[in-house]
Image (spheres, grey):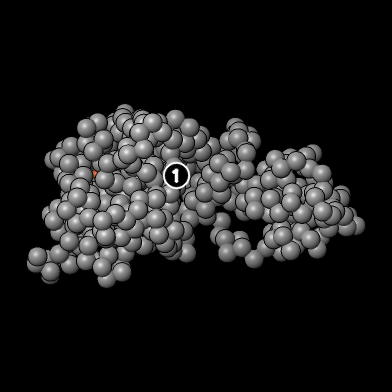
Amino acid sequence: MNFERVKEKLNILADAAKYDVSCSSSGSNRTNKNKGLGNSTVMGICHSYTEDGRCVSLLKILLTNHCIFDCAYCVTRKSNDVQRAAFKIQEVVDLTINFYRRNYIEGLFLSSGIFKSPDYTMERLVAVAKKLREEENFNGYIHLKSIPGASDELMYEAGLYADRLSVNIEIPTISGLKLLAPDKKHEDFLKPMLKVKNEIVRYKSEKKLIRSTPKYAPAGQSTQMIVGATGESDKDIMYSATHFYKNYNMKRVYYSGYVPVADDKRLPAIGTQVPMLRENRLYQTDWLLRFYGFAVNELLNDAHPNLDIEVDPKLSWALRNLNHFPVDINTADKRLLARIPGIGMYSVSKIIKGRKFRKLNWEHLKKMGVALNRAKFFILCDSPNWERRDLDADRIKGMILQNSSGKFRNQYSSQLSLFN
Ligand code: SF4
């Protein structure tokens, strides 16, 4: 191996991969067999995240940043004048093994621009995973990016070696995709997703009958949407995410604030602020939909197509629905408790357990981790009522913001206004 050349390629191809946020090693339990290398049982929880929540513990690279397509939002697009490189299959295998042995990484996240054709590229991605598993006996985590338009046969094979597969939908609406990536067809994303979903379901049901059935993409599949490249509302984005969770058994949908990389009048200008706060609000909404029993139309609808950037989506919902409050902590059901701002699911469980033995008051709630600075406006408990019950939504919001130390408090993103 020519180390200098590989190092040069690594610089180019790791840099090009940084725009993809859909890497997370949670959810897999591949065990180490035959004294092989790595163990994703441990790795399932050993990934680390940067401050903004991005995963950093995987070797995250592109196989190549050559691409036959010209998606306007992508730094790898063919019309972009950047230095290009491509790894050989064996180079990626060697890098992964060497980095793993040095304890730099816990696994591999491998994506790619499209060489020649989707199948030609997918075949190479699969070959890397296959070599790692079969020749190097590597049991660490592998996340393969699926190439839109790849054949069912290759998608099937990919799931036999990878822990997680993902096809990035990138632009949340069909019209946005047509505008920015006219080479791509919406069906090219859906077909591989559907194949992976069907195989996961099939393998799971076969495993119930035949215990020796191998695992197929045990950490499931994920996708990523770029936020703020086009004028989609948060409502469009979350309806699209819900569709993928429901119909394609997505493990995760990732939201990635658009980083302006192109001087193109279809896109926000270079230098426009990356909508990190909007991205954060979308993740919070995603969480509320998956774990807190909210429906999309409660949080986002025609009257409120975008999330309130200043406060989290649960607080925003509560402020619009003050008629549901105050909620009595000592009698309310689980569903209603989960809707109180400042109370997470962990605290909900503690409240339900704790109130079996005593009536809960402010002190109990504080010890349970309830954020009383927010919750106090919305609850009753076994303490004297918080003295103010005459406040309207604007006043409550103002008081909460005044006492908030949130790092995003003063960063009001102007991203959405670009499309008004
Ligand atoms: S196909 Fe993928 S890598 Fe190629 S330009 Fe489009 S988004 Fe970028």
| Residue 138, above or below 337 | below
Horizontally, residue 21 falls left or right of residue 113, namely right
- Asked whether residue 377 is in view, the answer is no
Which picture quadrant has residue 272? bottom left
Residue at position x 69%, y 61% from top?
Answer: 369
The image shows residue 44 at horizontal and vertical percentages of 41, 55
Residue at position x 83%, y 58% from top?
Answer: 361
Q: Indicate the secondary structure of the residue bearing disc 1.
A: strand
Residue at position x 22%, y 55% from top?
Answer: 137
Which picture quadrant has residue 172? top left
Horizontally, residue 118 falls left or right of residue 279, namely left
- Asked whether residue 6 is in view, the answer is yes
State how many labels appear.
Answer: 1
The image shows residue 344 at horizontal and vertical percentages of 65, 52
User: Amino acid under label 1?
Assistant: Arg
Horizontally, residue 384 falls left or right of residue 61, namely right
Frontmost residue, 66 versus 270? 66
Category of crowding for the residue at label 1, using alpha-carbon neighbours closer than 10 angstroms: few (below 14), some (14–19), many (at least 20)? some
The image shows residue 20 at horizontal and vertical percentages of 35, 52
Write down the residue under mark 1: 252
The image shows residue 250 at horizontal and vertical percentages of 43, 39
Residue at position x 48%, y 32% from top?
Answer: 246
Which picture quadrant has residue 194? top left
Frontmost residue, 278 versus 351? 351
Frontmost residue, 190 versus 344? 344
Frontmost residue, 191 versus 211? 211
Taking the image in four quarters, ligand 1 sits in the one at top left
